Image (tube, rainbow, N blue to C red):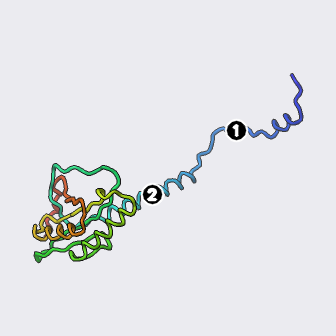
Amino acid sequence: MAQQTNAQKARAATRVLPEQDPEFQIAPMIDILLVLLVFFMTIATDQVLQVNKEVILPVAKEAAPDDKGPKSEVYVNVLWNMDNTGRIEVDTAGPKDIAGLPEYLTKKRASAEEAGLPPDRFKVVIRADKRSKYQYIRTVMVAIGQAKVPHVIFSAVDKEMSKPAATE
């Protein structure tokens, strides 16, 4: 056998033998899971805020979703009251009446175009209660037209929602 030099002897002496079983590091996994949890909560919160439980959507069994890339949508909830009057709710900070709708939509469309979104990807989604009168929805559509919005979508469900049990 050849003689070992002092440097080789020093390397052999400082070499650490591997452990029998590597330990599982749980702290980095928890960090990653918390980041994912926060991410999904923010995405889910954005979608949940757009739903209004007072709106009962009409049924459209043959409707197809639009999945053609990034888009900017403004949700206009058309509510129909028991006293046969309508009202709208637009986003969380939008106008509360139809008169302010064109100006609000014009600003939203301009900000989407400034962000680099093509003009045809800006849409207004009308979520009208199925009890709403056509005349009222027509005034909402006229206001949207005054804002020169290129695409208007009517939201509907693909099946009849289960009706709650009658309470006495």
Q: Judge by depth and name the residue closer to the eye, 130 or 73.
A: 73
Q: Secondary structure at mark 2?
A: helix
Q: Is residue 131 left or right of residue 28?
A: left
Q: Position of residue 110 (x, y in %)?
A: 34, 66
Say which quadrant the N terminus sits in: top right
Q: Judge by depth and name the residue closer to the eye, 113 or 28.
A: 113
Could you tell me how many numbered marks the image carries? 2
Name the residue located 39 percent from the left edge and 59 percent from the top edge. 116
Q: Which mark is residue 37?
A: 2
- Which amino acid does the dot numbered 2 rest on? Leu
Q: Is residue 138 visible?
A: yes
Say which quadrant the C terminus sits in: bottom left
Placement of 60 over or under 144, stated as above or below: above
Q: Position of residue 42 (x, y in %)?
A: 41, 62
Q: Position of residue 30 (x, y in %)?
A: 53, 54
- Rendered image quadrant of residue 128: bottom left
Report the residue marked by disc 1: 18
- Mark 2 crowd level (few <14, some 14–19, many ≥20, 10 Å Cα): few
Q: Is residue 6 left or right of residue 115?
A: right
- Which amino acid does the dot numbered 1 rest on? Pro
Q: Position of residue 147 (x, y in %)?
A: 24, 68
CA separation, marks 1 and 2?
A: 35 Å
Placement of 72 over or under 24, stated as above or below: below
- Rendered image quadrant of residue 9: top right
Name the residue located 27 percent from the left edge and 70 percent from the top edge. 90
Q: Secondary structure at mark 1?
A: loop
Q: Judge by depth and name the residue closer to the eye, 69 or 25.
A: 69
